[in-house]
Amino acid sequence: MTLRTVPQDQEILDQFFSLSARPSLEKVAWLFGMVAVYGKTPEELEHFTWNDDYTINLQCKKRSVRPLHPQWVFLFQLKEKQPPKLKSCWNKILKGLSKEQDAGLVLPIEDVLLAHKVRKLYYTPSKRQWPVASQKKRSHLLCSV
């Protein structure tokens, strides 16, 4: 069994900005940022559309996908830096991302997705459970009416 480490937010930010600093990798950086922000694989993101509130629609989902870190959408300028004619260059961007991963210059996408899942679980509030004493009081009040 292999233990995987969950990348820290700062590590993801550093990787994004190191990619985007190289002009030949700006599109790869954009795709890496989309994966980090929305927690979807590149294949799932292929035919996405933007909404006005910076959520995205995917063909495979009925509901819009919200960014885990909404500030990253602005920080990475994902909507503004989306490559023009994305459909025609999608495969080239995927190959570029894969090449950078193979060279060890980018975190594996699986690790970025794992980081997104862990943080989503951590940030999502759980359903509030009433303490046992409060449940008894509530049921007593309901019965006495």
Image (cartoon, rainbow, N blue to C red):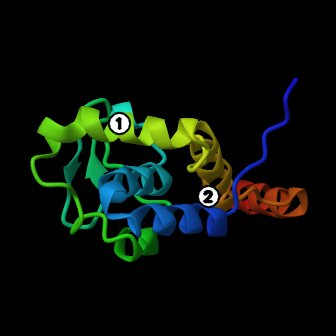
| Label 2 SS | loop
* In the depicted structure, whether residue 47 falls above or below residue 36: above
Q: Position of residue 124 (x, y in %)?
A: 61, 58
| Label 1 SS | helix
Q: Position of residue 104 (x, y in %)?
A: 61, 44
Task: Tell me the kind of residue under disc 1.
Answer: Leu
Res 20 visible: yes
Alpha carbon distance from label 2 to label 1: 30 Å
Q: In front here: 97 or 57?
A: 97
* In the depicted structure, whether residue 93 falls above or below residue 80: above
Q: Where is residue 50 in the image (x, y as percent from the top left)?
A: 20, 55
- Which residue is found at the position 90% from the left and 62% from the top? 133
| Left or right relative to 114: residue 135 | right
* In the depicted structure, whether residue 19 falls above or below residue 100: below
Q: In front here: 86 or 64?
A: 86
| Left or right relative to 69: residue 57 | left
Which quadrant holds the N terminus? top right
Rendered image quadrant of residue 60: top left
Q: In front here: 129 or 32?
A: 32
Q: In front here: 132 or 58?
A: 58
Among numbered discs 2 and 1, the one appearing first in the sequence? 1
| Left or right relative to 10: residue 83 | left
- Which residue is found at the position 36% from the left and 55% from the top? 25
- Which residue is found at the position 12% from the left and 37% from the top? 88
Which label number is shown at residue 57?
none
* Residue that mark 1 sits on: 94
| Left or right relative to 127: residue 15 | left
Task: Tell me the kind of residue under disc 2.
Answer: Thr
* Residue that mark 2 sits on: 124
